Amino acid sequence: MNSLAYALLAMLVRKPCSGYELAKMMEVFWQAKHSQIYPLLAKLEGGGFLTAENIEQTGKPNKKIYTITESGRAQLKSWIGKAPAHPVSRDEFLIKAYSLSLSDRGTAVRLFEDRIELYEKKLQARNLKLNSMIEEFGEQIENPIHPAFGRYIVHRRRLHLEEQEIAWCRWVLELLEA
Amino acid sequence: MNSLAYALLAMLVRKPCSGYELAKMMEVFWQAKHSQIYPLLAKLEGGGFLTAENIEQTGKPNKKIYTITESGRAQLKSWIGKAPAHPVSRDEFLIKAYSLSLSDRGTAVRLFEDRIELYEKKLQARNLKLNSMIEEFGEQIENPIHPAFGRYIVHRRRLHLEEQEIAWCRWVLELLEA
DNA sequence: AATAACATGTAAGCTGTTACATGATTCT
DNA sequence: AGAATCATGTAACAGCTTACATGTTATT
């Protein structure tokens, strides 16, 4: 049971999903590849943490819908209380920022402008996501008893992260242009 | 040449270092293990990007000081201009936050309080680091021409990240205690 | 005509972690 | 007495990425 396995269980607590859907939902945690997700789902099914149902579709490929079992829910629940592993954020951009004195001003400015563009796209998608959640659930989403509460606070965390990345880039650009 | 290799080159531009020192300095990017760093340094030396010098010490184990070569500096410089890979932040804590509705209020509160404690320690160390840099270099550190500029902006980024993590945790705790 | 979305899977290779291995000195 | 710091390395294993494989429908 690695952290990706727990991420899959966590998303399946919300609702039964296909591997394809889970791969897209993983964005909120980190972008795992489908080649890692599909075999792991099969393994979790083998371990009795999930059940799978084949759905035949016309005009689209067939799919498998995975549902979490009581055993899966229990496994996740007991894991939540344990001390989390230290977070790892592997971001090449910081190495480039660290080495900024090696490059000319034009290259440096372009690097930060591209970064802002990337994060503004992420921010837009995040706002859409959060607004649709607020529209669906209303103020009750800020109530810890609400089933979407956990999902909401995680997307809020990501929103702040994205806003702050842009703010930091703008601050660096100001220093570069001074 | 992977991103860890570039991280090592970036740190060696600043000054020649031992593998042990580099492992500690890696904290600002991500915490790579020594078992990955030592063989990679040997490989980079073999590729002509670094030179190594054995330093005999008394009372302490001997060490190897690596120095970046012109070829290493050129390699790093040409990499900076290229589009960076998408950042990956693998953080188990977000999975636990996402699944919060599964656990009782006490477990949830403890989880977030422990997180605040962890990040307050990181924040303290970061402030010490930044203050020592400001003391050493003065206002000129905010000048992009200054050799420590890159290092400074990266530590500033980490500072913001740590402050914001604490702010987010406090916000969640307020909602949990409401 | 080409790309994107839908949908699942395997295989090879690279990256990263944990454990093994050694050993003196300093701090609590 | 035990833990931490200094210091470097290897081996086995686990995790992750890239490429291979297939095929339809809808959109640009």
Image: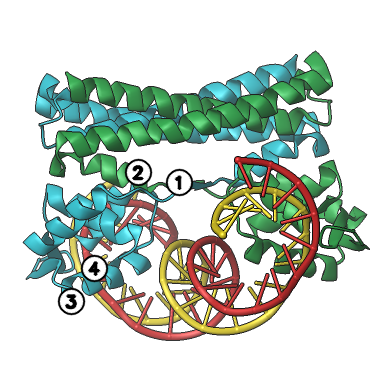
Chain colours: A cyan, B green, C red, D yellow
Left or right for A145, reference B47:
left
Count of marks overlaid on the render: 4
Callout 4 amino acid: Leu
Chain at numbered mark 1: A
- Callouts 3 and 2 on one subunit: no
Name the chain under label 3. A
Quadrant location, the N terminus of chain A? bottom left
Q: What residue is pinned by disc 2?
A: B93
Question: How crowded is the residue under tag 4: few (<14 C-alpha within 10 Å), some, or many (20+)?
Answer: many
Query: Would you identify the image quadrant in which residue B170 lies?
Result: top left
Q: Is residue D11 left or right of residue B73?
A: left
Q: Amino acid at mark 2?
A: Phe
- Examine the image and state in which quarter residue A7 appears: bottom left
Residue ID for mark 1:
A87
**Parent chain of label 2:** B
Residue at which label 4 appears: A41
What kind of element bears circle 3?
helix
Task: Check if mark 3 and mark 1 are on a common chain.
Answer: yes
Question: Which residue is at the front of the view, B132 or B92?
Answer: B132
